[in-house]
Amino acid sequence: MTLRPLMLDDIADQRAYERQRDAFRREVIAAKRLRRVSVGPIVTLTFENRLTMRFQVQEMARAEKLTTDAQIQHELDVYNRLLPAEGELSATLFLELTTEEELRTWLPRLVGIEQSVVLEIGAGPGRLQVRSVPEATHGSQLIRQDATSAVHYVRFPCGSGGAAAVATGPARLLVDHAEYPAGRPGVELSEATRAELSGDLTEL
């Protein structure tokens, strides 16, 4: 079972959205602050849920001036595929590269980065280690042999006990790609972030 998908009724028309956009953006920014985790200097993951995906669709519709049900449904079909299924987390992986030189340097080196993020849950030898899995549809479009993309969509299949384990903690996110040693120490997730992710693992 997947997280309840977004429907046409979840998406406000453009006039209504303009009236609520400022408040909605503040809500999403506050949520993303808890859901965004940086691992080293250039890798950032934002864990996605219905709120963040709804924002993506609303902003896409606004930018592209999409008004018909068919146009909105197409965007919903795309972004609903990125919602986590039962027992898993879904995230957008960003490579924070801002110059042409950085892109030329890092994109060829970080091929395979989408399979190199590990969520460690618990402590000691019994801790759970969940490796990132590229989202199937988008992965086939983004993965190249000679250079990676600056954006990937990944999943973390945490299993039936994941919610309780994440809520209890500790939990750490690390990157074990050979060309990115800065990601290997990882970063411990805050209690507030763990609460958000635990909610994702239990919400349907």
Image (cartoon, rainbow, N blue to C red):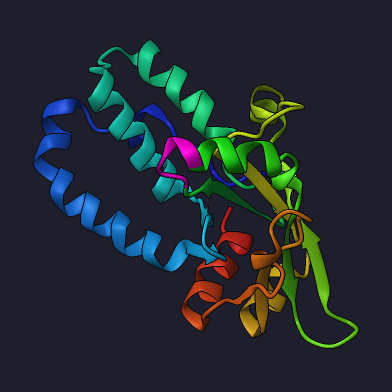
Q: Which residues are magenta?
A: 97-101
Residue 202 located left or right of residue 68: right
Above or below 197: residue 80: above
- Residue 62, position in %: x, y? 23, 26
Residue pushed farthest right? 125
**Towards the viewer: 73 or 25:** 25
Image: 4 above or below 132: above
- Quick check: can you spot residue 59? yes
Q: Position of residue 127 (x, y in %)?
A: 83, 79
Q: Quadrant of the N terminus?
A: top right
Which residue appears at 72% of the width and 31% of the height? 136
Question: Which residue: 43% across, 31% down?
Answer: 7
Q: Position of residue 175 (x, y in %)?
A: 70, 61
Relative to 150, is 123 on the left or the right? right
Q: Is residue 73 magenta?
A: no
Of residue 87 and residue 99, the one placed in the foreground of this image is 99
Q: Magenta stretch: residue 100 in it?
A: yes
Residue at the limit of the structure toward the bottom, as seen here:
124
- Measured as percent of width and height from the top left, residue 85 is found at 67, 47
Is 16 placed left or right of 70 in the picture? left
- Would you say residue 152 is visible in this rendering? no
Among the 4 quarters of the image, the one containing residue 60: top left
Q: In the picture shown, does residue 11 fall above or below 85? A: above
Relative vertical location of residue 194 with respect to residue 16 in this rendering, above or below: below
Magenta segment, principal secondary structure?
Answer: loop
Q: Residue at x 46, y 47 (%)?
A: 50
